[in-house]
Amino acid sequence: MLGAFVRAFRTPDLRRKLLFTISIMVVFRIGSFLPTPGVSYPNVQQCIDEIDAGNDLLGLVNLFSGGALLQLSVFALGIMPYITASIIVQLLRVVIPKFEELHKEGQSGTAKLTQYTRYLTIGLAILQSTTVITIARSGRLFTGCTVDVIPDDSWSTLLIMVLTMTAGTGLIMWLGELITERGVGNGMSLLIFTSIAASFPTAMWSIAGGNNGATKFTVVLLIIVLVIGLVVFVEQSQRRIPVQYAKRMVGRRMYGGSSTYIPIKINMAGVIPIIFASSLLAIPGLVAQFGDQSAEWVRWVSTNLAQYDAPLHLLLYVILIIFFCYFYTAITFNPDEVADNMKKYGGFIPGIRAGRPTADYLSFVISRITAPGSLYLAVVALIPTVAFAMMGVGQSIPFGGSSILIVVGVGLETVKQIESQLQQRHYEGFLR
């Protein structure tokens, strides 16, 4: 592996791409520590030291921003507005026929959808920055901290803060696109990888420094290695449906006659179901924060839904992950469209007639594959959460199964892209 990296850096074009990608990731991390104008940086640090940030309901956004949210930095919102906008645009393809037409137009339609995603990202960034600033002003961002993180709450200062955070989100979006175009590719995913991976060393160091630190550190490390092994095994697994293309004459040339396959991954939805489930479960607790803390319903929500290790929370978490796994797979994989494309180019599945029977067969296979895939996602999401809670280190861990799934998935995809570029230059690859 080390020799392969050396060979990659010896290739001038690939070396430039790798160095460019690394420099963008460094800029992204620097922006995560630059305080937003109007924020008292010493007071923010004091509040972070005083409170237990693991209980915060905005932990998901803080995770994807690499801890920048609690710092109230320029990149406080991180990549979450873009992720949300991308998901919304994908879901709107089912509702708005125009979006589906653009998706089928190819590169020009995709460029138009990307433009809509950018506009929606800026709109969501304005909404989310306003929400974060409102929560910070009310003192609910750092519950229990008495100092003011925003000493000057005049309208001009608040407006500058909203504009700064929104501009930070726009800059992150641009940095991600630069990595995709001029770097090794997969830009947005690499920025998410950077944000999550940045929190690992601090969390592991805090565990090692506590009571029975060495024992807990070893057990946590073993759990992480176990989950990583499970993720790598399942993410690399796929069901290959054979496809045969009939021979046909076009002029004097003969086309077709080849055999290929449709690769269907066990986990086609990726980490999206976990993000959806976490976001929905965070809403009741967020609403309860703004209610009367002495009310019965607020106490019930705080006990049963806001606590990540509550039995009802875990049950709903699993149900939502399974539901969104089926839902998102149904949106992203259209058996009718795949069957029509195969029929158009003379392809067929051996033993299955082209057209509607092929679409029905693909639907059957997808439903059977999604069942273990959804259970796999639920297990990956729950193993670290339950294990860390039983060990009493849950509040020290800012990551769980979803974070490990993202880090491993992005790492595998990046290695594959570098591998393909090395193979184009007749080098031995990373994967043997």
Image (tube, rainbow, N blue to C red):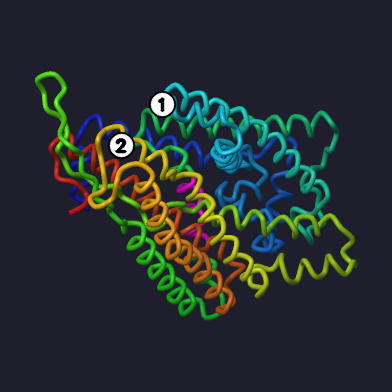
- The residue depicted at 15 percent of the width and 34 percent of the height is 247
Residue bounds of the magenta highlight: 192-203
Is residue 90 positioned above or below 107 on the image?
below
Residue 244, percent from left and from top: 20, 44
Q: Earlier in the sequence, mark 2 or mark 1?
A: 1
State how many labels appear: 2
Q: Secondary structure at mark 2?
A: helix
Name the foreground residue: 213 vs 165: 165
Q: Which residue is mark 1?
A: 106
Would you say the magenta stretch is mainly helix, strand or loop? helix
**Residue 202 is a magenta residue:** yes
Q: Which mark lies nearer to you, 2 or 1?
A: 2
Q: Which residue is mark 2?
A: 343
Is residue 343 positioned above or below 216 on the image?
above
Would you call the spot at circle 1 few (<14 residues within 10 Å), some (14-19), or many (20 or more)? few
Name the foreground residue: 79 vs 12: 79
Badge number at residue 47:
none
Residue 380 seen in the figure: yes
* Three-letter residue code for mark 2: Lys
Is residue 245 positioned above or below 167 on the image?
below
Residue 172, percent from left and from top: 54, 34
Q: Secondary structure at mark 1?
A: loop
- The residue depicted at 64 percent of the width and 41 percent of the height is 73
- The residue depicted at 73 percent of the width and 71 percent of the height is 304
- The residue depicted at 62 percent of the width and 70 percent of the height is 314
Residue 33 seen in the figure: no
